[in-house]
Amino acid sequence: MCFSRVNHSKGVIKFDGKQIITTRFGAIPVIVHRPIPDGMTIKTATITKKADGYYVSFSLEDKSVPSLISTENIKTAVGIDVGLKEFLTTNTGETVSVPKFYRKSQSNLARKQKKASRKEIGSNNWRAAQNRIARLHQHIARQREDFHYKTAHKLVKEYDMIAVENLNIRGLAKNTKLSKSIYDVAWGAFIEKLNAVAAVRGVHLIKINPHNTSQNCSNCGQKVPKTLSVRIHSCPKCQVVLDRDENVAINILNKALNEVGIILSACGGLDGGQPVKQETSANED
Ligand SMILES: [Zn+2]
């Protein structure tokens, strides 16, 4: 159920911080998971039934629009590559591993499914067993969401500018297998959250065209063709040897710096610990 007006004189639903008051059902006490932040106006309410009960979610309006950090004030920047081997790899070679939530819950899920299969379909016991399965799926989804938010907050706290690949472009450009598109969905969900978290802090999120980011040498620009199974980037021209994903992340960062128009030597801040080289940002492609 959706309500387009909350706490409005003509609306049918109100929230007083402790309970939901509807004209139809009266006052219903709620568990408030997160208080409404100061300065926010509640716009809409959605009531949904989930495996473990009913939920009310509000959409909020924040009138104070944060301004983006100005280009000359960008002091730290990071390029990140999302992938199958690691959840993400940065241009400095730092990695965040793929969380194993699903795998960890797999045996638990199989056990619950087996139990459910022994119940008479449609019976109360069957219904209860189905609910336990749904709750486990919900638990896994929440763990994943939590992981996405934590990772996004960590990046946004640390950097003024974050560069990622535009996954939509890649999805269209390449024939993706089903399994990979599932991963893509998870990355897409992560990038979406990263976008929201970055916007609140005025951090730049630059989405670059992924064309050639995995093939080109991040050090000299030479095209070094390699299949997905080749995990090391080894450049025959400049002899640089890098982890495949790290090479991609550096290319992503360089493309983004190019796009924003930050020239490293003139920027001043973007040195020390940032192994990015100015000449690579002049690469065509
Ligand atoms: Zn090279």
Image (cartoon, rainbow, N blue to C red):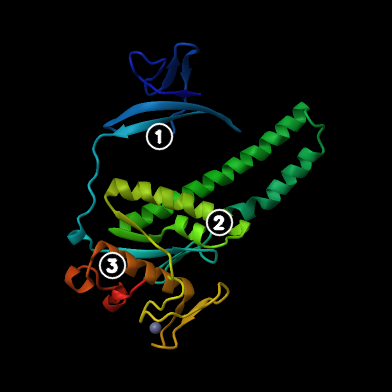
Q: Nearer the viewer, mark 2 or mark 3?
A: 3
Which quarter of the rendered image does ligand 1 occupy?
A: bottom left
Q: Could you tell whether 231 is left or right of 131 in the image? A: left
Which residue position is annotated with label 2?
Answer: 183
- Mark 2: which secondary structure? helix
The reply, left or right, for residue 102 in relation to residue 66 is right
Whichever of callouts 1 and 3 sits on the residue coming sooner in the sequence is 1
Q: Earlier in the sequence, mark 2 or mark 3?
A: 2
Q: Residue at x 51, y 65 (%)?
A: 86
Residue tagged 3: 258
Q: State left or right for residue 50 relative to residue 46.
A: right
Q: CA distance from mark 1 to mark 3?
A: 40 Å
Three-letter code, disc 3: Asn
**Residue 134, position in %: x, y?**
64, 38
Residue denoted by label 1: 34
Query: SS of the residue at dot 3?
Result: helix
Picture quarter with the C terminus: bottom left
Amino acid identity at mark 2: Tyr
Nearer to me, 62 or 226: 226
- In the image, 136 versus 210, the foreground residue is 210
Q: Residue at position x 40%, y 64% from top?
A: 80
- Which mark sits nearer the N-terminus, 1 or 2? 1
Residue at the spot 73% in from the left edge and 48% down from the top edge? 110
Determine the secondary structure under disc 1. loop
Q: Is disc 3 surrounded by few (<14), some (14 to 19) or many (20+) residues within 10 Å?
A: some
Q: Decide: few, some or many residues near mark 2? Use Cα within 10 Å; few <14, some 14-19, many ≥20.
A: some
Whether pointer 1 and pointer 2 mark residues with C-beta atoms closer than 8 Å, the reply is no
Q: Position of residue 142 (x, y in %)?
A: 53, 44
Q: Is residue 135 above or below residue 75?
A: above
Percent coordinates x, y for residue 183 in the rendering: 55, 56
